[in-house]
Image: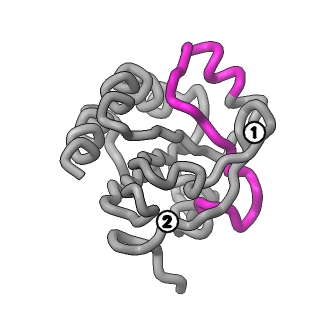
């Protein structure tokens, strides 16, 4: 079993696809704080709320000098539709590649629901300092109040 990167470890520098077809990785944000929030699926109730909450707080994150990046396994095209439908402002990226970032972090994992076993994303948020080191991890995130808690921690970093 691999050990998951945690507080004090370097955040893996694995490229993700942007909705526009470009790529983005953690090192692109060196010199500023970064929040990377992983969520299971575009346009599902909890994931929509989480993205809307981060969108609502984006001006406060900007003011605090903190970049945001939302990540799921959804395709770039699905992200485009999700962004347009809900007018999302926090940038999104697709981690659709096998052995991608969520695999490296150990948060793409086996889940069970109603007796069915499948692979899925564990809703997890990382606060990364300006040097690219993981400063805080929120595991198995509950959406309500989460974006606010992350903003407070980012301001304190």
Q: Is residue 130 above or below residue 142?
A: below
| Of the pair 15 and 65, the residue shown nearer to us | 65
| Residue 11 percent location from the top left of the image | 49, 65
The residue depicted at 23 percent of the width and 42 percent of the height is: 155
Secondary structure under badge 1? loop
Q: Which residues are magenta?
A: 80-102
Mark found first going from the N terminus, 1 or 2: 2
Residue of label 1 = 75
Q: Badge 2: few (under 14), some or many (20 or more) residues near its Cα, within 10 Å?
A: many
The residue depicted at 39 percent of the width and 49 percent of the height is: 33
Colour mapping used in the image: one colour
Residue of label 2 = 11
Q: Between label 1 and label 2, give the one nearer the viewer.
A: 2
Secondary structure under badge 2? loop
| Residue 6 percent location from the top left of the image | 38, 71
The residue depicted at 71 percent of the width and 39 percent of the height is: 18
Q: Is residue 72 above or below residue 42?
A: below
Inspect the magenta stretch and tell me whether residue 30 lies in it: no
Inspect the magenta stretch and tell me whether residue 83 lies in it: yes
């Amino acid at each position: 079993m691999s050990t998951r990167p945690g507080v004090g470890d370097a955040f893996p520098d694995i490229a993700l696809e942007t909705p526009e077809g470009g790529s983005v990785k953690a090192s692109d944000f060196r010199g500023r704080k970064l929040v990377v929030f992983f969520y299971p699926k575009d346009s599902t109730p909890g994931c929509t709320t989480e993205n809307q909450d981060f969108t609502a707080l984006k001006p406060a994150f900007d003011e605090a000098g903190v970049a945001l990046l939302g990540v799921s396994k959804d395709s770039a095209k699905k992200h485009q539709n999700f962004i347009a439908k809900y007018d999302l402002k926090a940038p999104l990226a697709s981690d659709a590649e096998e052995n991608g970032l969520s695999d490296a972090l150990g948060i793409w994992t086996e889940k069970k629901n109603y007796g069915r076993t499948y692979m899925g994303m564990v809703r997890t948020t990382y606060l990364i300092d300006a040097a690219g080191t993981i400063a805080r991890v929120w595991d198995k995130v509950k959406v309500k109040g989460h974006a606010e808690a992350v903003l407070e921690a980012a301001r304190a970093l």
